[in-house]
Image (cartoon, rainbow, N blue to C red):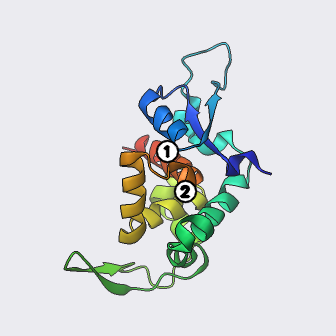
Amino acid sequence: GNQALQEATVSSVANNDDGAKRAKQSGATLKCLRPSNPSDESSIEPMLHGTTTLFPKHGLYQSMEQEFKNSKDGKYWSEYEYVVHKLASEGKFTVHGTIQTRDKGHDGMSLKDFTNMDRPKKANLSQAEVAVLRLLTNHRWSSEINKCLRTGEDIALWSTSISMLISALLKLSVLS
């Protein structure tokens, strides 16, 4: 099988020992990443260009889909399907007693349209990275992933989505 489906990746550049320990405790296989220039141990290439450059071209996207289909009995599949496969449609929902509007002003936009907006284009975000950022703004999945990141619980279930999220945030951080 595709290793990207089964591995949580920890960059030696980030030196995140606590995160690595939690990932290991959750049963994830850890893989240490080498700098792009082996003679330069201080290389921050993965941080500048995102962690997606370290994985097979299409493995992560398929894995994200599998994570949403299979994790937590597919509890978040409808959110994934909406963000990735359907056109955006403005809608109201309630979070903790507050009415919020989903996709305000983005009616009819596809994932490709969101990816081609100025900021994602400037940051060179992939469709998978834009998808995970859009999913993070969904109150149901964001609660799940935030709990996972805080506690380390179930981190292996979402390893690819987390990798995509980190990659997107790293790429966007260069713009600010």
Res. 129 mark? 2
Outermost residue toward the right? Answer: 1
The three-letter code of the residue at mark 1 reads: Lys
Instruction: State the image coordinates of residue 22 (x, y, percent, origin top left).
Output: 46, 38
**Which residue is outermost to the top?**
39
**Which labelled disc corresponds to residue 25?**
none
The answer to whether residue 6 is left or right of residue 124 is right
Quarter occupied by residue 44: top right
Of residue 11 and residue 38, the one placed in the foreground of this image is: 11
Work out whether mark 1 precedes mark 2 in sequence or the reverse, and give the earlier one: 2
Q: Do the numbered discs 1 and 2 sit on residues whose CB atoms are within 8 Å?
A: yes
Q: Residue furthest left?
A: 97
The image shows residue 160, relative to residue 18, as above or below, that is: below
Q: Element at badge 2? A: helix
Name the side, left or right, on which 83 lies relative to 148. right
- Residue at the image position 46 percent from the left and 66 percent from the top: 135
| Element carrying mark 1 | helix
Instruction: Please indicate, yes or no, whether residue 116 appears anywhere in the rendered image.
Output: no
Q: CA distance from mark 1 to mark 2?
A: 10 Å
Residue shown at the point (45%, 57%) measured from the top left: 119
Mark 1 neighbour class, 10 Å CA radius: few under 14, some 14 to 19, many 20 or more: many
Dot 2 alpha-carbon crowd within 10 angstroms: few under 14, some 14 to 19, many 20 or more: many
**What residue does disc 1 label?**
171
